[in-house]
Image: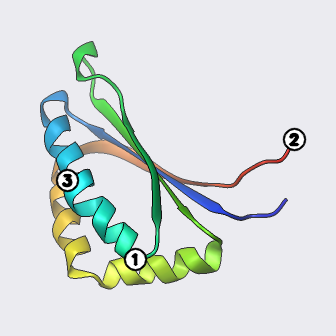
Amino acid sequence: MEHAPVHIVDTSLVAAQDHERFLALVREEIVPTMTDAGIECLSVLASSPEIGEDVEVQVTWRVSDHQAWNVARRDFFLDPRYHAFSATAASLRTGGRRRILYPVEG
């Protein structure tokens, strides 16, 4: 199985009352910073805040391969914007996970 392109799927849980603030952070700060580092944003999806649970926000990113991911990761970790939004995002998240996935043929 070829491990390219690399899809990074970040899923964050946020309290329903914080979901709009978190989505604004994603759109206005996280996506531009990650894009500048060479990571393509494929989608931003969210569950409904109206169901009485934490909102699940899923952002899917894509890079060409692991080498590109390592370079991009270095670049966004060195970007001061990353550290600024990370603290805010951490204060809003109640949980989450990151998965690294690959296309599967057939």
Q: Which residue is mark 1?
A: 37
How dense is the environment of label 3, judged by Cα within 10 Å: few (below 14), some, or many (20 and up)? some
- Is 7 on the left-hand or right-hand side of 95? right
> In the image, is residue 29 above or below residue 47?
below
Instruction: Verify CB contact (< 8 Å) between mark 3 and mark 2.
Output: no
- Is 80 on the left-hand or right-hand side of 98? left
Q: CA distance from mark 2 to mark 1?
A: 32 Å
Q: Which residue is mark 2?
A: 106
How dense is the environment of label 2, judged by Cα within 10 Å: few (below 14), some, or many (20 and up)? few
- Is 33 on the left-hand or right-hand side of 28? right
Q: Which residue is mark 3?
A: 25
- Amino acid bearing label 3: Leu
Label 1 sits on a secondary structure element that is: loop
- Amino acid bearing label 1: Ala
Identify the residue at image location x=32%, y=43%: 95
Q: Residue 18 falls in which quadrant of the image?
A: top left
Q: Earlier in the sequence, mark 1 or mark 3?
A: 3
> In the image, is residue 36 above or below residue 104?
below
Q: CA distance from mark 1 to mark 3?
A: 17 Å
